[in-house]
């Protein structure tokens, strides 16, 4: 199966960076809220520059990605009362990558949010293989998306 996001141009994550659709940033990364979160708080850490794969980034960028993720997790902990987190990168199409721009999913978790704690992965897989424009996939309208982004941005500003 050829996924249309691998093939699509322009890159949706480059355009998210260009359009300031993020709620927190570091020098080389931004955090964006997932337009169709699989659980409340589901966000993504993406490099501002277009890298297809994690290993295309140098060691300094890899380190910055992890440190920045911790800042983002602090914001999500306040906003969503999360107790733990899934951090996941699907690096390469055989690993399930569907957008050709490095992204780490950060998924806040709480006790009993899913019937089995490991159910998040099949749900994530299903959500990324569904057409993003499909009515089957819950998503925010522009105003709702802007509201949640502004809310998280404000929490980040209060923290720093
Ligand atoms: Zn890109």
Image: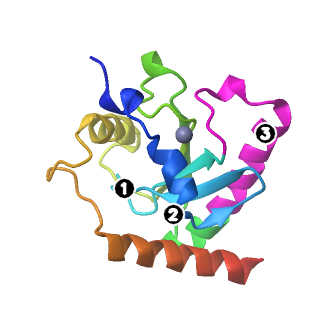
Q: Left or right of 122: which side holds 15? A: right
Tell me: residue 136, above or below residue 98. below
Q: Which residue is mark 3?
A: 61
Residue 106 can be seen in this image: no
Look at mark 2 in the image and give the residue it sits on: 21
Question: What segment is highlighted magenta in the picture?
Answer: 49-73
| Ligand 1 image-quadrant field | top right
Element under disc 3 = helix
- Residue 153 location, x and y as percent? 59, 75
Mark 1–mark 2 CB contact (< 8 Å)? no
Magenta span main SS: helix
Viewer-closest of 106 and 146: 146
Q: CA distance from mark 2 to mark 3?
A: 21 Å
In the figure, is residue 17 to the left or right of 110?
right
Q: Secondary structure at mark 2?
A: loop
Q: Are marks 2 and 3 in contact (CB under 8 Å)?
A: no
On the image, the x and y values in percent for residue 108 come to: 50, 57
Mark closest to the chain's N terminus, 2 or 3: 2
Whether residue 113 is in magenta: the answer is no
Up-down relation of residue 9 to residue 145 (above or below): above
N-terminal label among 1 and 2: 2
Task: Tell me which residue sits at (29%, 48%) in the image.
Answer: 115
Q: Secondary structure at mark 1?
A: loop
């Amino acid at each position: 199966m050829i996924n249309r996001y691998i093939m699509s141009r322009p890159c949706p994550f480059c355009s998210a960076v260009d359009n300031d659709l993020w709620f927190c940033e570091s020098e080389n990364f931004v955090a964006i809220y997932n337009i169709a979160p699989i659980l409340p708080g589901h966000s993504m850490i993406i490099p501002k520059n277009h890298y297809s794969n994690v290993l295309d980034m140098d060691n300094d960028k890899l380190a910055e990605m992890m440190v920045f993720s911790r800042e983002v997790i602090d914001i999500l902990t306040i906003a969503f009362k999360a107790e733990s987190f899934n951090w996941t990168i699907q690096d390469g199409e055989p690993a399930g990558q569907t957008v050709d721009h490095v992204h780490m999913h950060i998924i806040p978790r709480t006790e009993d949010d899913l019937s089995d704690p490991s159910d998040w992965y099949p749900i994530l897989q299903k959500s990324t293989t569904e057409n993003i424009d499909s009515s089957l996939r819950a998503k925010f309208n522009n105003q709702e998306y802007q509201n949640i982004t502004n809310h998280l941005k404000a929490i980040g500003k209060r923290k720093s």
